[in-house]
Image: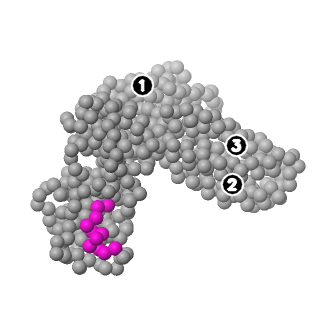
Amino acid sequence: MKIKTISSFDAYVYYTEPYKGRYFFRGQADASWNIKPSLFRCGAATLEMERQIIHNGLEEDKKATPLSILFHAQHYGTPTRICDVTVSHLSALFFASEGDADGVVFVMDKSKTITTAGYEMGLFTTILTENIYKASDLPQDGPMTSPKEIITQNYVVDARDFNFSNERSFRQGGTGIVFGFEIDNDNISPIGRNTVDELIIEKIIIPQSVKNEISDKLRRLGYSREILYIDPEENSEFEGITLTETESKVDVRFDPERFNKVIAKYRLNTLYYDRDALSLQIDKLYRRLFARYGANARIWTFFYYDENDLTNSNWICRGEWPKNDGYAINWNKSFRGFRLHYMNEQISRDEALARFTDLVNRIEPIYDRVYSYVSSADFDVSSFFALIKSIRTDSKDIFLAAGDISRSDADFEKFSEAAYQHIADIDWLIGDMAIFADRADIKEQYIRWSLSNTYIPSCEKSKRTYLEAKKIAANIK
């Protein structure tokens, strides 16, 4: 097993950048601890204990599943056979940076992930919900592997099965290792083997000497107990608020009288704000804006913390024009949760670059055929439509594949957005032309005009933007 010791927060982020989206992580405050679920540590575990937890959970939520109930219980302090892991290298680092000893982040194999709907977890659910105490009483209708062998193994569950099961899991990017049972003379015991060495690829040691620096930087990003476990609105230790204007656009409009339409974005200096105090700051801001642009100005404002929020349009709140005098604030109650979720789900820069480049390389020859065909002023529209129909499915598939690519970090997203926009523009051209091909009311003159004045210029512009962004992305460290 590979072991790496890091010397700072920046060193950790740089080292784990290629791991994002490819592995699971688990952070522990003490590197000497084994990975062991809380049920295995409580000393008096029985199958009845787990069955009662599940029974109580189903009484409260009929739509829940036995494993989601255990996962929820695990996040709120009840001993279970589930050990938390996360999709996020930063969330894991937070837990590894607690305490006074050297911490550790375990990097875990993602390829061995299973789903809660699979045969393995089906057997686990049977044991935990039915009156079964002997392995020979388990269903024998599964794959060739015997039930006895299956239920004694430990499994990492697909993050999509657990990540949305409760708010803490959502914020922490959580999923879990479900630990198996032990069989003794056909009797099923709740405490199985507590080793997961076969899942661990690497251990990253977090020295105690750098924990304070790491914790401080993680806190600024939102990885703190206040945000990972509760909402800072419930915490009285708020920080002072400052607002910095980062973008502003003013247009003169008439409807019917003259007014100024204002759209502005403001960066907040802290994630640990009091909403009432922020509301007062926003009110002062609006008073200044109305004084500057007129009492009848229509003003929209957007408030965010950093580039991660800006990239995802995840606003703290928005100021809106309510179709009468003044303004209204629309608060995003899920701002902090989605902020962490978006960062947790980021893929590596290398993966984003490779996947988007591949898709652009696939759609560019399709676009070149269209561009070459319409470059002739007297091209035959009927033949052009035949070409469009022959390539429509391919362009649509590429566009949908681009939409499935997760975001990378905020610095790299300018490349991803440029690539996505270029793919989207080409698909827009081909998709609209496919619609026009089936409409008898569209005149050839309009088709030629729209291609030369709208669709082709848009594709050419997004192509230039993509190529420029790709050059910049290649130099991002």
Q: Residues within 10 Å of mark 3 (few under 14, many from 20)?
A: many
Q: Quadrant of residue 20?
A: top left
Q: CA distance from mark 2 to mark 3?
A: 13 Å
Spot occupied by residue 476 in the image (x, y as percentages of width and height): 52, 33
Position of 17 relative to 249 (above/below): below
Task: Identify residue type, mark 1.
Answer: Leu
Q: Please tell me whether mark 1 sits on a helix, a strand or a loop.
A: strand
Spot occupied by residue 154 in the image (x, y as percentages of width and height): 29, 61
Q: Residues within 10 Å of mark 1 (few under 14, many from 20)?
A: some
Q: Residue furthest right?
A: 378
Q: Is residue 181 magenta?
A: no
Q: Residue at x 20, y 37 (%)?
A: 101
Position of 178 relative to 345 (above/below): below
Q: Please tell me whether mark 3 sits on a helix, a strand or a loop.
A: helix
Instruction: Tell me, for residue 459, which label it has, or none.
Output: 3
User: Which residues make up the magenta segment?
Assistant: 145-155
Sequence-wise, which precedes: disc 2 or disc 3? 2
State the residue position of label 2.
431
Q: Is residue 51 visible?
A: no
Q: Quadrant of residue 118?
A: bottom left
Sequence-wise, which precedes: disc 1 or disc 3? 1
Q: Nearer the viewer, residue 436 or 381?
A: 381
Q: Nearer the viewer, mark 1 or mark 3?
A: 3
State the residue position of label 1.
243
Sequence-wise, which precedes: disc 2 or disc 1? 1
Spot occupied by residue 427 in the image (x, y as percentages of width and height): 66, 51
Q: Residues within 10 Å of mark 2 (few under 14, many from 20)?
A: many
